[in-house]
C-alpha cells in the first residue's frame, strides 16, 4: 500500500509450468526468433527472418508484428545459453521504452520448469501503459502453453 492508501500497481507479471521436454529443446524455440510466432500467445508476432538465433546479450533481432507493416527490434539484455533470455523491444531505430520480456528455464522433475515474465517497471511512455496493463498472467500462460505443446511434440 502506498502512503495515500492506494494499492501499488504490479508491473511484473509472470506465468510458469513444467514442460515435458529437455531444457535445450525448449530454449531453442525461444532463442530462435523465427520460431516465436509459433508459440506467441498474444498473437502479436507475424514472422522473423531466419538466421537471427540469439547468441549473447547485446544481440538485436527484428520481428514483424501482426499489425501490417509494423516491425520491432528486440535488444537482448540477459542471456545464459539454455537457461535465460530477456529482451527489451523497441520500434526500429529507437531506444527501448522500458518493458522487458524474460524466459527462465530450470531442470525439474518431469522436464523443465519454464517461467515467462513481462516486466514493465521501467516503462515511462504514457501511450504504452494501456497495452502494458492488458498483458496479464493469462496471456503469458497462453504463450507458455503453446510453447509446451510445440516442445512436447518435438521431443515426444
Image: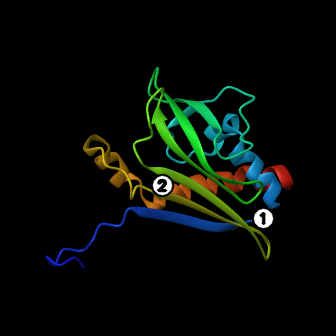
In the displayed structure image, the side of residue 25 where residue 18 appears, left or right: left
Q: Above or below — where is 95 with respect to 141?
A: above
Residue 14 horizontal/vertical position (percent): 51, 64
Give the residue displayed 49% in from the left and 40% down from the top. 89
Residue 131 horizontal/vertical position (percent): 34, 46
Disc 1 packing (10 Å; few <14; some 14–19; many ≥20): many
Q: Which residue is mark 1?
A: 20
Residue 76 horizontal/vertical position (percent): 60, 44
Colour scheme in use: rainbow
Disc 2 packing (10 Å; few <14; some 14–19; many ≥20): some
Task: State the residue lying farthest toward the top.
Answer: 69
In the displayed structure image, the side of residue 15 where residue 82 appears, left or right: right
Location of residue 119 (image quadrant): bottom left
In the displayed structure image, the side of residue 60 where residue 22 appears, left or right: right
**Quadrant placement of the C terminus:** bottom right
Q: How many marks?
A: 2
Query: Observer-nearest residue: 53 or 22?
Result: 53
Q: Which residue is mark 2?
A: 139
Earlier sequence position, callout 1 versus callout 2: 1
The residue tagged with tag 1: helix, strand or loop? loop
**Quadrant placement of the N terminus:** bottom left
Amino acid at each position: 500500500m502506498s502512503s495515500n492508501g492506494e494499492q501499488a500497481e504490479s508491473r511484473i507479471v509472470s506465468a510458469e509450468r513444467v514442460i515435458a521436454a529437455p531444457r535445450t529443446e525448449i530454449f531453442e524455440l525461444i532463442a530462435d526468433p523465427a520460431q516465436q510466432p509459433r508459440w506467441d500467445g498474444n498473437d502479436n508476432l507475424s514472422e522473423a527472418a531466419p538466421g537471427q538465433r540469439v547468441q549473447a546479450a547485446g544481440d538485436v533481432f527484428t520481428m514483424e508484428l501482426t499489425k501490417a507493416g509494423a516491425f520491432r527490434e528486440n535488444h537482448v539484455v540477459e542471456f545464459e545459453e539454455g537457461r535465460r533470455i530477456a529482451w527489451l523491444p523497441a520500434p526500429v531505430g529507437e531506444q527501448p521504452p522500458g518493458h522487458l520480456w524474460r524466459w527462465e528455464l530450470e531442470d525439474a522433475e518431469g522436464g523443465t520448469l519454464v517461467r515467462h515474465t513481462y516486466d514493465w517497471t521501467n516503462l515511462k511512455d504514457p501511450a504504452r501503459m494501456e497495452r502494458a496493463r492488458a498483458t496479464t498472467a493469462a496471456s503469458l500462460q497462453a504463450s507458455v502453453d503453446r510453447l509446451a505443446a510445440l516442445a512436447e511434440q518435438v521431443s515426444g
